Image (tube, grey):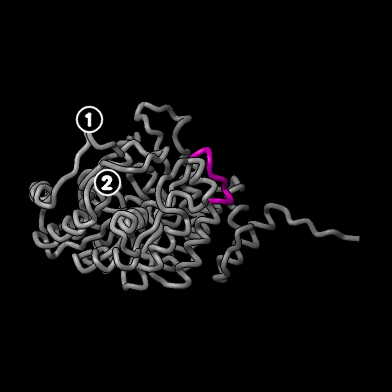
């Protein structure tokens, strides 16, 4: 009797055939790819999948990251950005103070404000509404991409309003898209172990579902690289997002975020490996077949690895940022921002065509 044994080479060939024919990968396929050490084949498959979706174009945006407050009720194990009220370095800026800060750094090419911050329970929900109103009034042409799903859930508890009512109030104030943060790993086991004192996995998904129903296109992330999450949880995370995208088609991009080690002096053993970073980007591209874009986030993986990631399935190199704070508070060693010329150089250096975009991936300028 002949017993057919699926060798690793045969399994990889079967996955390659699925990718070639547009057949959706299963959880078992994703786990096999994570457990494989054949990084180049995985990268090649992801590159092929990305080229079919986006050609040689790689997108970036002129944006500014803004942080109104670092005071936070949550005590997540991986965060070094948060402060308690009264701590040294704790701050809460008014809308006028943020407008003053932006005015010092703003130029007419800036198209997006990326706004996240702490869950500050010492101010009312109206503070967060007024923050957006102040920016929109002073910079009406700039898209407001603000708050994470976890922040939205916090505002619901703070105000007594439903998730839908919170979102509608913010939309009326000028909100145009949600940021992707707060997802971490969409596993309640992980969230319990890592003391993720904010929205549960199901609440995170429900906020984005509701935002999509209200007409917002949103962003989403996965914070990977802790000793706590399993590879199966990473794949399941992607599958939860894939299922919601099937339902709403509301996500613009998936952003894998490599966990930072808190201490900037942490050695190499405390940091995520480049091998895992590239593999995660590539597997994301292969699993999330209904997402148009996968982002390589230079803040977490560095500029040179970002270049390589552009041939491992990534089609977005993020943006200028100006001054990133959250990952750098947690020990990131990368630049806190890049100029437009640097992003163009980075993308061209990978043999790709840089495309300046707006928040919604409408093309502003192609740099042939």
Q: CA distance from mark 1 to mark 2?
A: 16 Å
**Residue 311 horizontal/vertical position (percent):** 43, 54
Image quadrant assignment for residue 72 = top left
- Residue in the foreground of this view, choosing between 296 and 222: 222
State the residue lying farthest toward the right. 1
**Residue 138 horizontal/vertical position (percent):** 8, 59
Q: Disc 1 designates what residue?
A: 88
Q: Which residues are magenta?
A: 226-233
Residue at 56% x, 53% y: name it: 41
Q: Residues within 10 Å of mark 1 (few under 14, many from 20)?
A: few
Q: Quadrant of the C terminus?
A: bottom left
Q: Is residue 229 magenta?
A: yes
Residue at 26% x, 53% y: name it: 319
Helix, strand or loop at mark 2: loop
Please indicate, yes or no, whether residue 324 appears anywhere in the rendered image.
yes
**Residue 85 horizontal/vertical position (percent):** 24, 37
Q: Is 168 rendered above or below residue 268?
A: below
Q: Quadrant of the N terminus?
A: bottom right
Examine the residues drawn in magenta and state their main secondary structure: loop
**Residue 362 horizontal/vertical position (percent):** 27, 69
Pointer 1 with pointer 2, Cβ within 8 A: no
Helix, strand or loop at mark 1: loop
Q: Is residue 304 magenta?
A: no
Q: Disc 2 designates what residue?
A: 120
In this view, the mark in front (1 or 2): 2
């Amino acid at each position: 009797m002949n017993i057919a044994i699926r060798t690793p080479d045969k399994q990889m060939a079967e996955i390659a055939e699925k990718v070639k024919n547009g057949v959706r990968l299963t959880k078992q396929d994703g786990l096999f790819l994570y457990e494989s050490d054949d990084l180049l084949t995985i990268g090649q498959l992801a590159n092929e999948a990305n080229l079919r979706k986006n050609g040689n174009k790689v997108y970036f945006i002129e944006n500014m990251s803004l942080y109104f407050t670092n005071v936070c009720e949550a005590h997540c194990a991986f965060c070094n950005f948060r402060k308690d009220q009264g701590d040294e370095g704790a701050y809460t800026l008014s809308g006028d103070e943020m407008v003053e800060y932006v005015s010092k750094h703003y130029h007419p090419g800036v198209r997006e404000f990326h706004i996240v911050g702490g869950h500050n329970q010492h101010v009312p929900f109206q503070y967060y509404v007024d923050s957006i109103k102040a920016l929109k009034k002073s910079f009406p042409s700039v898209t407001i991409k603000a708050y994470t799903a976890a922040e939205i859930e916090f505002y619901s508890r703070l105000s007594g309003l439903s998730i839908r009512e919170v979102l509608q109030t913010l939309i009326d104030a000028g909100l145009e898209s949600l940021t992707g943060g707060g997802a971490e790993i969409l596993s309640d086991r992980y969230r319990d172990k890592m003391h993720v004192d904010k929205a549960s996995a199901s609440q995170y998904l429900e906020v984005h579902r509701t935002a999509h129903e209200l007409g917002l296109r949103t962003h989403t992330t996965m914070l990977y690289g802790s000793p706590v999450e399993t590879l199966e949880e990473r794949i399941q995370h992607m599958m939860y997002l894939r299922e919601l995208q099937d339902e709403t088609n509301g996500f613009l991009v998936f952003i894998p975020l490599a966990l930072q080690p808190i201490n900037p002096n942490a050695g190499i053993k405390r940091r995520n490996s480049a091998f895992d970073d590239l593999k995660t980007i590539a597997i994301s591209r292969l699993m999330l077949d209904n997402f148009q874009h996968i982002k390589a986030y230079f803040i977490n993986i560095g500029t040179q690895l970002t270049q390589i990631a552009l041939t491992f399935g990534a089609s977005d190199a993020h943006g200028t940022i100006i001054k990133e704070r959250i990952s750098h508070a947690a020990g990131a060693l990368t630049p806190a921002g890049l100029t437009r010329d640097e992003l163009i150089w980075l993308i061209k250096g990978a043999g790709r065509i840089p495309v300046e975009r707006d928040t919604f991936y409408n093309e502003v300028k192609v740099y042939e």
